[in-house]
Image (cartoon, helix red, strand yellow):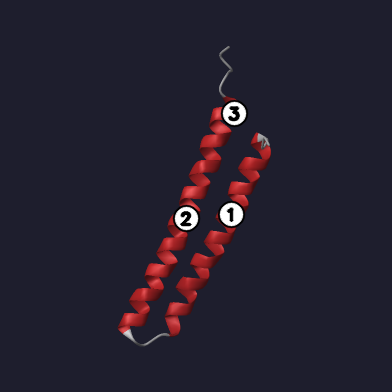
Amino acid sequence: MQITIKIAVFGALAFALVCLGASINGFIQTQGLTDPQLVSDGRGYAFFWLFLAIVAVAIAAATWWISRAPEQR
């Protein structure tokens, strides 16, 4: 089974949006917490999802960049 480049890029970007949404939700939810341990854990959760979003965007960009390179045969 082969995945086209467009599907791979759009899939990675969709995954990045989901991860970014989870990250934003994590940052918003930590504002109402008073326990420092819970705030720290919540921020760690949010930063993890932000990291995943950045990786997904990097994969999408690399896939797009590789597809734009001239083929060498």
Q: Residue 3 — which label?
A: none
Ranked by sequence position, the earlier of labels 2 and 3 is: 2
User: Looking at the image, do the residues carrying marks 2 and 1 touch, with CB atoms under 8 Å apart?
Assistant: yes
Determine the secondary structure under disc 2: helix
Residue beneath disc 1 = 15
Q: Residue 67 — which label?
A: 3
Residue beneath disc 2 = 52
Which percent across, then down, holds residue 70? 58, 18
Crowd tier of the residue under label 3, counting other residues whose Cα lies within 10 Å: few below 14, some 14–19, many 20 or above:
few
Quarter holding residue 44: bottom left
User: Quick one: quadrant of the C terminus?
Assistant: top right
Which percent across, then down, holds residue 11? 63, 48
Name the residue located 36 percent from the left edge and 75 percent from the top edge.
41
Crowd tier of the residue under label 1, counting other residues whose Cα lies within 10 Å: few below 14, some 14–19, many 20 or above:
some
Residue 37, placed above or below residue 27:
below
Determine the secondary structure under disc 1: helix
Q: Amino acid at mark 2?
A: Leu
Q: Amino acid at mark 3?
A: Ser
Q: Amino acid at mark 1?
A: Phe
Q: CA distance from mark 2 to mark 3?
A: 22 Å
Residue 40, placed above or below residue 61:
below
Which percent across, then down, holds residue 16? 55, 54
